[in-house]
Image (cartoon, rainbow, N blue to C red):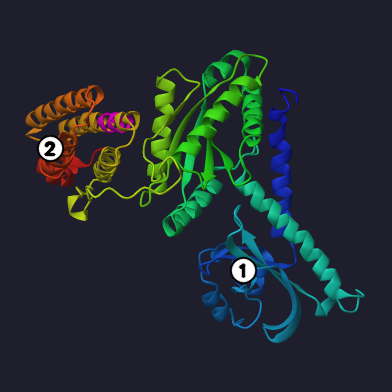
């Protein structure tokens, strides 16, 4: 493949997407798609005109309400009948003042794992064509097959990155939410791998964007050659990619990341210079949001960069033991409560994150995890505490918090204690469990986050306190 080929793909792809959209939007067939909650996601002009409504007014409105208002309540309804397979039926509908006969095709739209995420309908009036076409129903069904293919292609184009053909953010977010739901319901593991091309800016600056684009295209090709069919690769932005690995706990995900890291280094993706990647790995923690899960993997990736690049770093949390069995929950856990909120979204997210990372460390200590895992969990927590304290001190200056100097001094004391405890854990054969719990549960959480931090919360409510 030529290194300049990638740069020529966008115009053709854009033209194809435009043609497909025009085919569907301007088709005389009535076309509509609704989500599983019953609200319309899409309707073309022909469908909207039949209802005497603007097409742009339909998305977000419930199908029952729209059809009841339009007086078309028994037919031309997508309903839930398309949740299993494609069906073709001849149906009569009273539209306006006369009865019309339609061939109606109903179909499901499925996510990558086969789960139905929406349902659609294509309807073509066949009574009016009976005098000019030998078999109007057969003719309409053939046209519906063409439209279905166009819809499928539109869906794929909407979910894929134009340059590399990898999935895009929209698809990853939808797929991740489905996997998170499976994890919550059935206890399945699922992991994210965040991959970033090392020194990519230098590649663009030295050899041009055409070479940079070629490297990204070949990187996706390389990744797809080493992941399972159930795994997906997404271009998140720029030179950053994400692999979503269902039914994969942390240790297996880390092994996959090591394999990808080595394969990319060996693949010689460009003749211009060696190409390597840094990878961060995080297993989903039930109850956390997608953004937080992704942030853990992203931070791990940046630690891989800081440690020299061309390597893998994993966030230490895992709900599964090395043999694949689910580990028992720790009998000790710090519980985040709504009463702890400050009213400032950024402060609350950081506090909540500190609770979660403190719990991961407690779990590692209480479950007698390997020393390296405990040290990694503690390092992540101390990094988060340090970053939060620094940002909080800037906030105190901005809002004019009177006790900011004393608060900063308390930050210094807690960080010094964290450094001493970290050194103790690193050197002692027996982990000081009591001291770890005292520091996390009492000193940081009970005394500082829940106690001392409340002293500045009401300053956030003033006009000058709208910061962070």
Principal SS element in the magenta part? helix
Q: Check if residue 382 falls in the magenta segment.
A: yes
**Quadrant housing the N terminus:** top right
Q: Is residue 174 left or right of residue 149?
A: left
Q: Which label's residue is closer to the chain start, 1 or 2?
A: 1
Instruction: Mark yes or no: residue 238 visible.
Output: no
Mark 2 highlights which residue? 443
**Secondary structure category for the residue under label 1:** helix
Task: Report the residue at 14% width, 27% height from top.
Answer: 417
Tell me where residue 152 appears, x and y as whole percent.
Answer: 69, 55
Labels 1, 2: front one: 2
* Vertical side of 99 occupied by 231: above or below: above
* Range of magenta residues: 376-383
Mark 1 highlights which residue? 83
Tell me where residue 98 appears, x and y as whole percent.
Answer: 72, 86
| Residues under numbered marks 1 and 2 in contact, where contact means CB atoms less than 8 Å apart | no
Q: Specify the quadrant of the image occupied by residue 394.
A: top left
Total numbered circles: 2
* Vertical side of 24 occupied by 51: above or below: below
Task: Report the residue at 63% width, 74% height from top.
Answer: 81
Q: Specify the quadrant of the image occupied by residue 459.
A: top left
Task: Report the residue at 58% width, 43% height from top.
Answer: 232
Task: Report the residue at 74% width, 62% height from top.
Answer: 27
Q: Is residue 98 left or right of residue 109?
A: right
Tell me where residue 290 appears, x and y as whole percent.
Answer: 42, 47
**Quadrant housing the C terminus:** top left
Q: Nearer the viewer, residue 227 or 204?
A: 227
* Vertical side of 147 occupied by 325: above or below: above
Tell me where residue 215 appears, x and y as whole percent.
Answer: 63, 24
Instruction: Classify 10 Å Cα crowding around label 1: few (below 14), some (14-19), many (20 and above).
Output: some
* Vertical side of 48 occupied by 338: above or below: above
**Secondary structure category for the residue under label 2:** helix
């Amino acid at each position: 493949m030529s290194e300049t080929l990638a740069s020529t793909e966008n115009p053709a792809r854009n033209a194809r997407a435009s043609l497909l959209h025009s085919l569907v939007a301007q088709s005389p067939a009535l076309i509509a798609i609704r989500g599983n909650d019953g609200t319309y996601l899409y309707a073309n002009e022909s469908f909207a005109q039949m209802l005497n409504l603007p097409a742009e007014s339909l998305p977000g409105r419930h199908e029952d309400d729209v059809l009841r208002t339009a007086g078309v309540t028994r037919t031309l309804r997508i309903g839930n009948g398309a949740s299993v397979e494609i069906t073709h039926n001849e149906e009569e509908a009273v539209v306006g003042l006369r009865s019309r006969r339609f061939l109606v095709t109903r179909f499901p739209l499925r996510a990558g794992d086969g789960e139905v995420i929406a349902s659609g309908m294509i309807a073509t009036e066949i009574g009016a064509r009976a005098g000019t076409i030998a078999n109007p129903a057969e003719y309409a069904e053939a046209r519906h097959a063409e439209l279905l293919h166009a819809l499928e292609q539109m869906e794929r184009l909407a979910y894929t990155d134009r340059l590399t053909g990898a999935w895009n953010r929209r698809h990853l977010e939808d797929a991740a939410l489905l996997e998170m739901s499976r994890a919550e319901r059935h206890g399945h593991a699922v992991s994210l791998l965040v991959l970033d091309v090392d020194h990519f800016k230098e590649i663009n600056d030295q050899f041009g964007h055409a070479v940079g684009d070629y490297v990204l295209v070949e990187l996706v090709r390389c990744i797809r050659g080493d992941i399972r069919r159930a795994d997906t690769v997404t271009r998140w932005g720029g030179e950053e990619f994400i692999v979503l690995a269902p039914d994969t706990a942390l240790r297996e995900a880390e092994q996959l990341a090591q394999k990808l890291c080595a394969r990319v280094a060996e693949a010689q993706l460009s003749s211009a210079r060696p190409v390597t990647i840094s990878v961060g790995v995080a297993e989903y923690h039930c109850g956390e949001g997608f953004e937080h899960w992704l942030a853990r993997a992203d931070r791990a990736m940046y630690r891989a960069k800081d440690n020299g690049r061309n390597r893998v770093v994993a966030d230490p949390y895992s709900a599964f033991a090395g043999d694949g069995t689910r580990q028992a929950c720790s009998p000790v856990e710090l519980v985040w409560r709504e009463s702890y909120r400050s009213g400032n979204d950024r402060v609350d997210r950081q506090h909540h994150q500190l609770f979660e990372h403190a719990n991961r460390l407690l779990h590692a200590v209480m479950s007698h995890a390997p020393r390296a895992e405990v040290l990694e969990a503690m390092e992540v927590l101390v990094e988060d505490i340090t970053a939060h304290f620094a940002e909080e001190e800037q906030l105190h200056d901005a809002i004019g918090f009177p006790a900011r100097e004393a608060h900063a001094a308390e930050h210094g004391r807690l960080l010094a204690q964290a450094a001493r405890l970290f050194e103790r854990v690193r050197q002692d054969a027996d982990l000081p469990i009591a001291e770890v719990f005292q520091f996390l549960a009492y000193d940081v959480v009970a005394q500082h986050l829940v106690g001392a931090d409340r002293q500045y919360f009401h300053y956030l409510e003033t006009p000058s306190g709208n910061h962070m």
